Image (cartoon, helix red, strand yellow):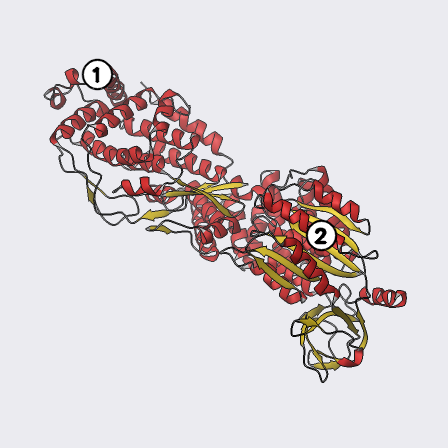
Amino acid sequence: VRLVVAVAVVFLASSAVAQDDAADSRTTRVEAWLKAILHHQPGESDAAAERVARWSYAELQALSVDVVALSMMMRDLRKNMFTFRPQGQRVTQRIPYTSRQLDRMRLLACAAAGIAKQRDCLLRKSPLLLDAELLQLNDVVSAASERGQPDYVLRRAAMLHADVAMSSRNELFDDSTAAAVAGAVQRLTIRVDDGRNTAMYFGAVHWDIARSLLAVVRPAGDPMVLLWYQATAAWMQADGYHENADHLTEALRLFPRDPLLLFLSGCEHESFARPAIQAAARSADLPPGFKLVVQSDDAEMRQAETLFRRALVQQPDHMEARLRLGRALLVRGSVREAAAELRRANAAAPDDLMKYYGAMFLGAAEEALGNFDSAGDLYTRASDLYPNAQSPHVALGALARRRGDRAAALSAMERVYDLAVAYPDGDDPWWTYDVAAGRDQKRLLAELKQMILAIQP
Amino acid sequence: VRTVVALLAALAQAPTFSSRVDAVRVDVLVTNNGKPVTGLTPADFEILDNGVAQQVDLVSFDQVPLNVVLAFDMSNSVEGDRRERLLEGADKLLSGLRDDDQAGLVTFSHVVNRGAKLTGDLAAVREAFARAEGIGDTALVDGVFAAMMVGESDVGRSLLIIFSDGVDTSSWLPSASVLDAARRSGVVAYAVSVKSRIRPEFLEELASLTGGRLFEVERTQNLDAIFLGVLEEFRHRYLVSYTPRGVSRTGWHQLEVRLKGRRATVKARPGYLAGN
């Protein structure tokens, strides 16, 4: 399993804000962005998504600031002072524009808000100054708005950036480029392979942009925004792409009682407690100014436990949250409580995968409690569910040895070796425990796509 | 020699798995200024089992054949040149074995694989090495447990040599469980770990509690020399056995091994766990 960890790194940004360059590259980029939103089909890797994917990290960072200003103008065209506070930062920053840039941004805001043909925008001659594509965007947004679907551009943009983020690779981190981009929050993505930090990328800017846009969708509690967070967080978990400091924190800020988001957030902290990420985090050689927010394994597990409990408060029959709560308790040494939770979870396990995990974890809890017969039965049940999995036989071998039964221990280990020969690539759900929590991602993304397409006029 | 081996073999069956502690064997390295001290007899040793002085029954030196179990990390982190150095080192090590020694091989990525059972057919072990491929995560703890079990599949004197260049990322077994198993085992574990910012705590503790040693290396260029050094050091260890008297038959037994009336450095496992 290869993990990509968007280590929640916070750049201690200088107070300077991105400066304009000589040409109007910023407004040109915003215009190109709006056209990409118009043409992008949600869930597809189409030409529009590929165009956006080709933009450099520096360009995207500048865009991430400009779209905040644009979204403000979409609400109030007369606004001429723009500030923003990057997620996770305490300092509010001003976004400066020249008057020419400001005029152009206002015209673009007219199209993005679907009001290019309304009085304020007509005064700015928007039908004359906007090209056919932008006017087409205006009409689409306007029609959506008339159908009771506000913030069309914000929603579609969030989908565009999610699609790009899920299908493209980030740029490799480069100190010199990083230094040139002042202002917006910077994050690094660390690629973790077998517990080692093998590469460092500029990361997460597409997710940053998407989140900043969805943060201003009104009214609050929008079902599409909820589904977007659920689906993308499930995708991140399934893909081993972790960004807990931002994605799920923002999701829970918007939807603090959603059981699925609470569950996925718990899973992410559980993943952060795993040795592979702990080792990579402890050995990461980060550039100056970057801060790692992966906590100790115990702290991460404690967080996971809290989040699973919160998920269960909202949805007491969330079997998988109970299962993972049981494991968190087991790892943290609350063995009796773990066993009680795991028994409840096992009674409700809907499929073989959940039954397997339940049997293994409860087996470990029973073993820790000295109930060796029960532990052996549970490991055996797990091996019946997944006959090609090594872990139940390793567990049986260790249990037998602990009980002083050398013959049974050797026999269990023979089975381990046989499986390694028969299935050299392995077939053990334990090895994919982390990513298994996101296994609903395809269904959720398909639902999200349908929901987005449904608002298309 | 044959008589000694047979007697030790019979003794070896009892102490680690049964709740009866008939005899305890302790591998002891005695050095003076870094050089092995030879020619010692039972009368030279003083053993305290939970503080109670014991009568040493038997001491052997360089006479008992070895069961050398190699537990090698074959995960993603061991690839290319590092893997080649590892295989070369293993080849040299096997060349250093004697006719009556045996070797076995366990490789581990996320999958634990016994490449070769304990065997005197070293060509078979070499072939198993050649087949081993590096891919996947690292189940170091599971792999070490498997290697201990390979060592215990035979009554001989077991030397476990572990190589890993990473941390455990996918084992099922908790490290505490395998360390506990090691406390009940007569195996002596030597480990070679590639230096990084992460301390190899599991290997460090394993080596310490079995009376072995951990080597942290910067590079893997000299693995062959390290492996041969381990073998030589192990051959210079005394196998000391005694029948515990005046102590409990279960639980943790603190061991102290000293020499009577001589100055030397004595290295042995710090204790053993008796009973279930």
**Looking at the image, which residue is at 30% across and 21% down?**
A38
**Can you say whether B131 is above or below B261 in the image?**
above
Residue density around tag 2, few if under 14, some if 14–19, many if 20 or more, within 10 Å: some
Q: Is residue B141 visible?
A: no
- Under mark 1, the amino acid is Asp
- What distance separates the C-alpha of mark 1 from that of mark 2? 75 Å
Q: Which of A182 and A180 is in front in this view?
A: A180
Q: Which chain carries label 1?
A: A
The N terminus of chain A sits in image quarter:
top right
Q: Nearer the viewer, residue A225 or A33?
A: A33
Subunit of label 2: B
Q: How many marks?
A: 2
Residue A341 x %, y %: 55, 52
How would you rate the neighbour count of disc 1 (Cα within 10 Å): few for under 14, some for 14-19, many for 20 or more? few
Residue that numbered label 2 is attached to: B92
Q: Which residue is drawn at 37% across and 22% down?
A: A453
Establish if A359 lies above or below A217: below
Image spot of residue A269 (x, y percent):
45, 49
Q: Are marks 1 and 2 on the same chain?
A: no
Q: What element carries label 1?
A: loop
**The residue under label 2 is which amino acid type?**
Lys
* Residue at the image point whose x is 65% and y is 58% from the top: B226
Element type at mark 2: helix
What label does residue B113 carry, if any?
none
Q: Is residue A199 left or right of residue A110?
A: right
Left or right: A199 as drawn, with respect to A92: right
Q: Nearer the viewer, mark 1 or mark 2?
A: 2
Q: Which of B25 and A71 lies nearest the eye of the viewer?
A: B25
Read off the residue under disc 1: A131
Q: Which of the 4 image quarters holds residue A399?
A: bottom right
Give the x, y percent position of residue A297.
48, 55
A169 on left or right of A320: left
